[in-house]
Image (cartoon, rainbow, N blue to C red):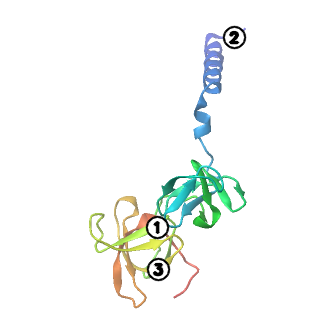
Amino acid sequence: MLTRRTFLKLGGMSLAAYTLSRWDGWRALQPLSLPTGRTIGAVPLYDRPNGKIIGYHFPDRVMTLGKARGGWIAVEDGYVAQAAIEPMPTWKQTATLPARFPAHMEVVAPAAIVRTEANALSPVVARIAHTSQMQAVDHLSGAHGGWIALADAHGALLGWSQAVGWRTLDDITP
């Protein structure tokens, strides 16, 4: 014989299972293991391979990649030329600062913006592409990992970039 508590548990699980089985939102949930890529420059979007242009994607747009065939890759809203996409691992938006500075770092975001000051409203000095490497010479703690100071090829201060778009390269020596 079932107790009232056991009956209510089973009834609740049955109702939840029925409700979830009829929900279409499952298609929107995607595992993190799907391949992603970023656009290199402004990329035309086609309705089918070698078809009609239906729009454009801006530089550094990250998108889920579908099947590739004949030099074309299926994306969420159409097809793009395979040569216009750079494969990229899933980007975890967490900052990993080195134990000491100066340190070599790599851009893990689609792109990193370098500014004159450690302030999101300060003027832009440079835009560093995905997988580019630079030397970080200092850091400021703050929200979302803070900021890192980047040096140019001669060791002079280039500017500041948000640390969340970078990762430490411990195995590379200057």
Give the mark toward the camera: 3 or 2: 3
Residue occupied by mark 1: 111
Q: Badge 2: few (under 14), some or many (20 or more) residues near its Cα, within 10 Å?
A: few
Q: Is residue 174 left or right of residue 34?
A: left
Residue occupied by mark 3: 134
Provide the secondary structure element on which disc 2 rests: loop
Residue 117 can be seen in this image: yes
Residue 92 can be seen in this image: no
Report the front residue among 109 and 92: 109
Q: Is residue 136 above or below residue 53?
A: below
Q: Badge 1: few (under 14), some or many (20 or more) residues near its Cα, within 10 Å?
A: some
Report the front residue among 62 and 85: 85
Q: Is residue 31 left or right of residue 99?
A: right
Q: Amino acid at mark 2?
A: Leu
Where residue 2 is drawn, which disc sits there? 2
How far apart, in angstroms, are the residues tagged by discs 3 and 2?
A: 66 Å
Q: Amino acid at mark 1?
A: Ala
Q: Residue at x 29, y 75 (%)?
A: 116
